[in-house]
Structures are given as C-alpha cells and as structure tokens.
Amino acid sequence: MSKAPGSRRQFILQTASAVGVTALGSSLAACGESATPPAEFKYGVASGDPLADRVILWTHARIPADDRAVWLDWQVASDSSFATVVRSGRASASAATGYTVKVDADGLTAGSSYWFRFIDDAGVVSPVGTTRTLPAAGVATVKFAVFSCTLYAEGYFNAYKSAAASDAQYAVHLGDYIYEYGAAATQFGNTDAVKLGRVTSPAHDIVSLSDYRTRYALYRSDPDLQALHARMPWITVWDDHEFANNAWVGGAENHNSSTQGDWNARKAAAAQAYHEWLPIRTPDASNLLKIYRSFDFGSLLTLHMVDTRIEGRDRQYDSFGDADGGLARYVAGLTPNASGVTPDSTRKMMSSTQQAWLTSGISASKGAWQFLGNQDIMGKMWFPASVLQAQASGSAAAVQAAIGAYLTAKATRAAAGVAALTPTQSALLNPGTNPTLPYNLDAWDGYPSQREAVLQAVRSQGKRLVALSGDSHNAWFNNLTTLAGQKVGVEFAGSSVTSPGFESAGLGGLASSLDGSVLVPQLGNAAIGNGLGLVDDLNYADTIRRGYLLMTVTATEVKGEYVFVSTVKSTTYTASVGRTITVAASNGAVTYA
C-alpha cells in the first residue's frame, strides 16, 4: 500500500467499515485535523482491463474551484454493502492527470464479481461500481458487449443504456470513443446537436491536452455512458477519432500542421488524455502509444486487442482511403514483379513488431477461440468492377442496372449451375473480365499484403479466428479469406453507437444487395449466408440502424447478436435483435436466425 497523507484514516476505514463514512470524516476533523473541502465525482466510476486476479479502477475527483490534489481511499468489496472489503488503498487525483485517478486492484479471485467505490477525505463517497475479473480455465460461457463509433452530437447513447440492462459481463470498445470535430453545424454529425441539447465542447476541433480532456469530460457527463462504465469492466482500444480523422503514424486527414501545430505533439496529447480518462492499464508511462495487449478468458478465448491506427500504419492510398485514384496503385501493388515480390508487401497497418507479437500470441494461446479486437473492417469488401464503373458514371439508373445484372447472374448460377449462364452473365462472374475491387482503402483492404500475412499465419496454426471490428458505422458479418479464397475465420463487425452510416448517404437500402438477401424471393433461405450478394465474402449487412454486438462464447460455438436501437434522436427507444449468427467450433458451420 502506498504511503500517503491520511494513512490513519485509511486504517480506521479498514478496521471499522461499519461506521458511516460521513460521520467518520466529521469525527476526524473534530480530533484536531483541519477540515478538507468536499470533492465532486462528476463523471462517475469505471473499471477496465480485467485480468484473472486484478482490475483497473477509475474515477475523477475534484474540489470545485480548487486546484489542490484530492486524496482518495478506494475499496473493493465482495458485497454491495461493503461489509467485506477485500482490497483497499490510497490514491490521489491531481492536476497532473486532469484530476482522474486509476488504481490496479490486485489480489482478487478469478471469475468473481465485486463492488468498488472511492471516498475523499471529507467523507464524500463516489457512486458505486460493479466489476468482474477474468474467468479461470474451467469457465463454460463468457458474454460481452461490443461497441464502436460514439458521436456525442449525433444522438443519445441508447446502445449503452440497452447494454447496461443486458446480461453482458464485459464491454469491449473498438475505437472512436470520442470524436475530435468542433461544434460548427457544417461539421460531421452536428445537424441535430442544438435541438438535442448535445452541442460539443470545446467548440473547435480538439488539438491540445486541455481540449482533449474537455472533450472526454463532455462524453463522460452522459448518464448512460456513466451507467455502463459503472456496470461492468471495459476493454478498449482507440481508432482515429481519439486523435483525428483517418490518422496514420505521420499525420491525419483532419490535421493541418499550419494551423494545428505539430502532429506528434497533438498525438501525444491525445494519447495522454486517453490514458487518463479510460480505465486502461498503462504499463509503460514512457510510451503511451503502445496499447496492444491480450486477455485470456479462461480456456475459452484469448482476446487480442490490436492497434491498426496509430502504432505503425503507413499512410493510406489517395484521399486517405477513398477508392479513387488509389485503385490503380492498389492493383499494381498486388501484381508480383519479375522476382515474385508484390510492391504492396512493405505497406503496414501495424508495425512488424506488433504483427510478430500478434501471430506468436495466437500461436501460444490455449484458448478454444482467438478473438481479434480490431478497429477496421478486415474482410475483403470487394465490389464488382461493373458496379463501380456504373457508380463512377454518376447515373443512379446505371448503378441499379449493373447491380441487377450481377445479382441475376449469381442467382442463375446458384439455382441452375454454370451451364445456365448466358455469355454476358459468365463474363460478369469471371474475375478476369469483371474483377472485384475494394471501396475503402482506409480499412484492411488498403493493406492487403499484411492482412494476407496475418491470415496465413493463423491458417498455418490451425486456430479458430473471430475478428471483432468497428469503424464503418454499419453492421457486417464476413468470411475472412486469403487472396486465394481460403476461409480462415469470420468477422463480426458491429454498427455504431450513434455515428451515421450508409443511410446518411442515401445508401441505407443497399444492404440486401450487398449480402444477397434480396434474392430470398427467388432462392429462399439459400440466399442467406452463401455469398450471393455484391460482396462475395459478406453474409449479412445492416446499413441503416445503430446499436451494438452481444457476443456469447462457449467451447462449442460463438454466437453474435446484432442488437439495434430504434432511434438515437430520443431517449425513448426500443431495442431488438436484428440477426443472430452462430459459428460452430467443430466445423465452422454458420447458422442465421
């Protein structure tokens, strides 16, 4: 236990926990100690990065209009009344950490639930949180909720509220916990901000440490976010908006060095604020940019949280990932030279060091499943060139005709075989005459050689791979396949908490064409999950609704429930499961309900 002012008070708290804390503070002051002004716990409590024997506890405490450090006693109990305090200690919230405090509460029992709280020297008690350690080897089931892309100004955090009422044991956040944009009505997501009472602060794009701290405070003032943090431990990783849109190692699309200063300085400020405000373990204070790490959920699964954004990413192709002039470079990058080397092979989403850590960690894991907590869509979201060319023409009728022709060809082949195809249809389905190409080069599609290396490593190890992905604002379920089409695993990509997706661009109705479900009237349930849409590896899509993923893992199967909320524009909403997808451990078979 650390030495700190108030150790006598801590001793009394531990040995006389039945005494009311407010009365205790008064009695100590009466014994001659100077009164301590009460602190405020405006942003609740949180826990995170659970291990089998420990968990990070978090809070923010500050005395109003006072810059002095706030000393806190923290307690972990096995009961809600704190009659049995199993771990306790002393910590301080100071200006150096923006008045946040994190403690690593160790000596806990695997797979156990606990209550925790903080108490200041005036006797003010924080809200009480519940947390849980990771399970021991014999665990039969693990359930966790998965989130991404939470834009405050766009709407209410109903997905968080729904998850807090679920039976999830853990929360996994895959990035874009905050957004960096200012409050101008023309900026992304601000259309309804004034009407909803969710105007972002500060009013400008956040750049400095003070800016980032203020933005986190705004998000953490949300009652639904506070409630979910207090309900279960979180495991988090950042994406780009915790820094700036479409970030990479050396810059970002939304960073202008002439007006916003040095990118490395902004990146350092953003990382510091992230470590201050998120309940993440910080093992190396000298390198806050290294956050990739793994979590063993007993013998069921290992969750590998990777950083494909800040730690080692090369700059995206043209226009920071939009599939425009970069496509020519993309194709050339995958075309081997005379020596058989692909020019793209040196481009990285993560450093070679992180890649080696990931593949060796998957190899060493004894978990029945290997989960990848990953920011960006990993599956091959490749569209037929005929559709992309029609889209480039700007004609909606041409796009619809191209989509219809391609899907009809697929339906014909599925129903009657290759012999039933017309020459035109055969050409549409021939990758030599109608190749498929990616639309988003900011995702793993923009770094295909490194994706191939990771998938081939997993394939050679014979591991069961499940990628969890965010960033896209829409819901997807993909096969993960090599460039040669060999299936290595699956990908559950959840919708955003609030950030608008395809529907905001008038593409909300595209989902059934993307995943092939539009063919159900012709083919029945055979159209579900068989790659009959525009994207071969895509088996489910929702391009309209906001929500989260609820994952249930056993030794025999992984079940993902796509939970959607009816609206983010009102605090009155309903939640429903749009699709349940189950993957069997025995043979990788997938069922849809």
Image (cartoon, rainbow, N blue to C red):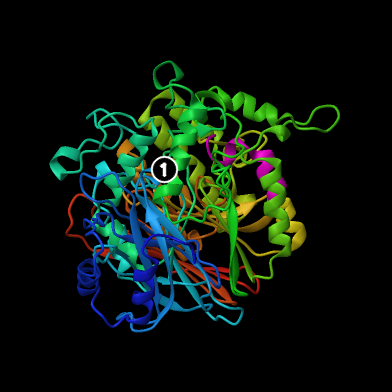
In percent of width and height, residue 202 lies at: 26, 34
As drawn, the residue found furthest toward the front would be: 32
Is residue 38 among the parts visible in the rendering?
A: yes
In percent of width and height, residue 493 lies at: 47, 54
Magenta highlight on residue 442: yes
Is residue 130 among the parts visible in the rendering?
A: no
The quadrant holding residue 234 is bottom left
**What kind of secondary structure does the magenta stretch mostly adopt?**
helix
The quadrant holding residue 214 is top left
In percent of width and height, residue 376 lies at: 52, 45
The quadrant holding residue 422 is top right
Question: Which kind of residue does numbered mark 1 sit on?
Answer: Ala
Question: Residue sitting at 69 percent across and 52 percent down?
Answer: 357
Considering depth in this image, is 173 or 448 the residue closer to the camera?
A: 173
* In this picture, residue 144 sits left or right of residue 307: left
The magenta region covers 441-454
Residue identified by numbered label 1: 273
* In this picture, residue 47 sits left or right of residue 227: right
Considering depth in this image, is 239 or 330 the residue closer to the camera?
A: 239
* In this picture, residue 518 sits left or right of residue 313: left
Q: Secondary structure at mark 1?
A: helix
Magenta highlight on residue 513: no
